[in-house]
Image (spheres, rainbow, N blue to C red):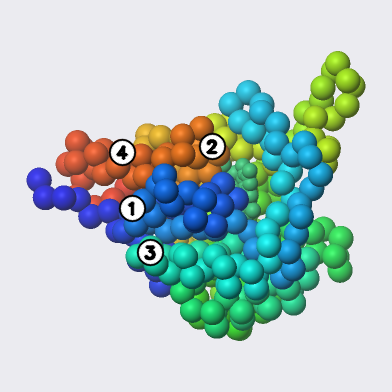
């Protein structure tokens, strides 16, 4: 059998394989480049970037849970100007699409970030993290289809880059938000962000996280993430999805593709095994060969009852 096709399309982007990094779990690239060959990834999704530098939340901000972690990092980053001046030049040396994850508290913040990153050159896609409180409305963009649509519509006006809206599972109906984002101009969707949880130390009778609540990720969330991908794919079958949530192995990745994801992100797994992303890419290719599948796209949404 000839080598199977592993390339997939997400908006205007062609990824050499469906494996990308989960925002916030792979730094900005340089932290991992000595361990992982970035040129073997489908894309590098960097940590959330905001208008101004953010110090993040007080510590402790990571707690281990059965089959997962709770994190309350608080979107620590050194700001968009620093990203463009100091991190992007490093990433431009690689032959891999760079997707920057954006965060803000007002629509204007995201528009500013999208304009700057589009003008900078060397950025291929923008992932819009809508799991952020909108200061004008007092709730996350992600919980309201009207706020989500307004945000994506305004960002769409200022950039031709591939736009990916990152959905939150902390909503009543994820399909409603997915549809609002796509109708407003999002080329693709990524899902899921973390689920809100907490943990308590009974000896000290205190919350384990300084922030009290944090986002749950890792294998514990996989069945929920898989269900979300399947629901959104069923409602919007032509929209490319980047699935994530507890993917630890090529087997997990194949499950997400079968549920309807076109690509998948490796997040928490990287903390357990730093080469998880490229290991999953190699494992996926081996699965295609072993099963006589000549194009990875044949798996997308191919699950049956
Ligand atoms: C320590 C940590 C930091 C994260 N930081 C971000 C972030 O900055 N922006 C974002 O959109 N998602 C962030 N995430 C969420 C992940 O990108 C991903 O959506 C989630 O963890 C589910 O995938 P996983 O179970 O494979 O980790 C973070 C997750 C973890 C564990």
* 133 sits to left or right of 20: right
Q: Nearer the viewer, residue 82 or 11?
A: 82
The answer to whether the beta carbon of the residue marked 2 is less than 8 Å from any atom of ligand 1 is yes
Q: Examine the rendering and report whether any part of residue 296 can be seen.
A: yes
Residue ID at (36%, 51%): 37
Quarter of the image where one finds residue 223: top right
- Mark 1: secondary structure: helix
- Left or right of 222, for residue 79: right
- Identify the mark nearer the N-term, 2 or 1: 1
Which residue is under mark 4? 283
Which numbered disc flags the more N-terminal residue, 4 or 2?
2
User: Viewer-nearest of labels 1 and 4?
Assistant: 1
Which disc, if any, is residue 40?
Answer: 1
Name the residue: 37% across, 44% down. 278
Rounded to the nearest whole Å, what is the CA distance between mark 4 and mark 2? Answer: 19 Å
SS class, disc 4: helix
Please rate how many residues cluster around mark 2, counting C-alpha atoms within 10 Å: few if below 14, some from 14 to 19, many from 20. Answer: few
Distance in Å between CA atoms under marks 3 and 2: 23 Å
C-alpha span from label 1 to label 4: 13 Å
Callout 3: SS: loop
Q: Earlier in the sequence, mark 1 or mark 4?
A: 1
In this picture, is 176 found above or below 52?
A: above
In this orientation, which residue lies closer to the viewer: 188 or 199? 199
Position of residue 298 measured from the top left corner of the image (x, y, whole percent):
28, 51
Viewer-side residue, 304 vs 280: 280
Q: Looking at the image, which is closer to me, 32 or 221?
A: 32
Task: Kindly report the distance in space between the C-alpha atoms of the residues bearing marks 3 and 1.
Answer: 10 Å
Numbered tag placed on residue 94 in the rendering: 3
């Amino acid at each position: 059998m000839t080598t199977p096709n592993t390339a997939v399309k997400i908006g205007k982007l062609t990824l050499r394989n469906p494996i990308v990094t989960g925002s916030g779990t792979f730094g900005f690239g340089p932290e991992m480049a000595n361990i992982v060959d970035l040129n073997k990834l489908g894309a590098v999704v960097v940590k959330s970037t905001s208008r101004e530098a953010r110090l993040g939340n007080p510590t402790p901000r990571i707690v281990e849970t059965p089959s997962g972690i709770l994190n309350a990092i608080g979107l620590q980053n050194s700001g968009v100007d620093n990203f463009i001046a100091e991190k992007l030049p490093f990433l431009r040396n690689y032959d891999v699409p760079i997707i920057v994850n954006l965060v803000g508290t007002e629509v204007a913040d995201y528009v500013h970030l999208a304009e700057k990153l589009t003008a900078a050159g060397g950025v291929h896609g923008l992932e819009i993290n809508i799991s952020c409180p909108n200061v004008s409305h007092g709730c996350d963009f992600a919980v309201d289809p009207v706020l989500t649509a307004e945000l994506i519509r305004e960002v769409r006006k200022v950039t031709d880059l591939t736009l990916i809206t990152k959905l939150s599972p902390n909503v009543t109906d994820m399909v409603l938000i997915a549809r609002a984002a796509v109708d407003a101009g999002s080329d693709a969707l990524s899902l899921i962000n973390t689920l809100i949880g907490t943990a308590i130390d009974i000896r000290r009778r205190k919350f384990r996280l300084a922030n009290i609540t944090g986002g749950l990720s890792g294998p514990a969330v996989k069945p929920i993430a898989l269900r979300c991908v399947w629901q959104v794919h069923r409602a919007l079958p032509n929209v490319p999805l980047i699935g994530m949530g507890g993917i630890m192995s090529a087997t997990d990745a194949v499950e997400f593709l079968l549920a309807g994801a076109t690509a998948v992100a490796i997040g928490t797994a990287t903390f357990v095994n730093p080469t998880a992303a490229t290991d999953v890419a190699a494992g996926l290719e081996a699965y295609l060969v072993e099963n006589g599948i000549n194009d990875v796209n044949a798996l997308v949404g191919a699950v049956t009852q």
